[in-house]
Image (cartoon, rainbow, N blue to C red):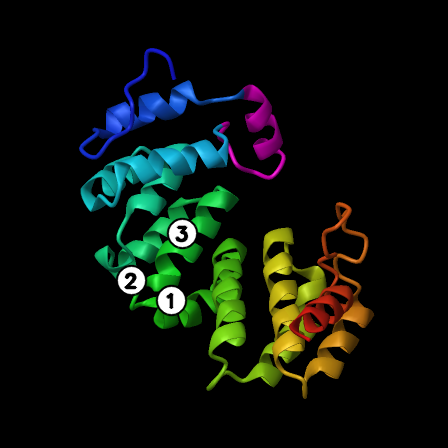
Amino acid sequence: MTGAPEPHPGSTAAEVVAILDALEDPRVRAVNERHGDDHGVNLTRLRAVAKALKSDQELARELWATGLTAPRLVAVLIAKPRGFSADELDAMLREARAPKVQDWLGGYLVKKSPHVEALRVAWLADADPDVAAAGWALTSDRVAKSPEGLDLSALLDEIEAEMADAPDRLQWAMNWCLTMIGVHDAGLRPRALGIGERLRVLEDYPTSPGCTSPYAPIAIAELVRRQG
């Protein structure tokens, strides 16, 4: 970061962008770009920048307005979840085509927003597969934490009918929801396992040693085992 300003509360958007530019690493960018994320900032260092800036809603909006992936990731980390309307969060998701920005937007802002349930329902039925993926991700979170009122059988019907041919990002989100239903609802577990075994989605996904395969039958069995 030689020659770049240090992050601190009160930093301007231009200063933060300069800091992030100084942290760019071509090797990190090459790895990220394979996953559709167009930035080269190590995420541990990016989080350190956000931590130094502290919560700052105005700066978050300015960083988001740059349209750049790394500044948008910082924006998500320093923004206040209750500081955005449902319409703003919806627009932000649709603008943020980088997968990491979409994931963090959902995980750090939408999940903690009073608009989470309305957005979950709307996004789940959206024709845009990336938006629908965000809806499925929020649904998976609800299956794990507060499934009351969800029609899990209907969700399994939809997964069974559509997951095999869904675009990659949507398929991944639906597969995780299938896994969460199998883990958290013992009564539906046999059906969830059967769907996973029939569709074989992500069966051959490369998995590093020590990590759990995302293939639903394996993931369900392992996560249930960990629950004891």
Tag 2: residue type? Ala
Tag 3: residue type? Leu
Graded by Cα atoms within 10 Å as few (under 14), some (14 to 19) or many (20 or more), the crowding at tag 3 reads many
Q: Say what secondary structure mark 1 lies in.
A: helix
Task: Specify the segment rendered in magenta.
Answer: 26-40
Q: Which residue is mark 2?
A: 86
Residue at x-position 38% and y-position 17%:
1
Mark 1–mark 2 Cα distance, whole angstroms, equals 7 Å
Graded by Cα atoms within 10 Å as few (under 14), some (14 to 19) or many (20 or more), the crowding at tag 1 reads many
User: Are dots 1 and 2 in contact, CB under 8 Å?
Assistant: yes
Q: Residue furthest top?
A: 3
Q: Earlier in the sequence, mark 1 or mark 2?
A: 2
Tag 1: residue type? Leu
Q: Which residue is mark 3?
A: 105
Residue at x-position 30% and y-position 28%:
16
Q: Earlier in the sequence, mark 3 or mark 1?
A: 3
Q: Which residue is mark 1?
A: 119
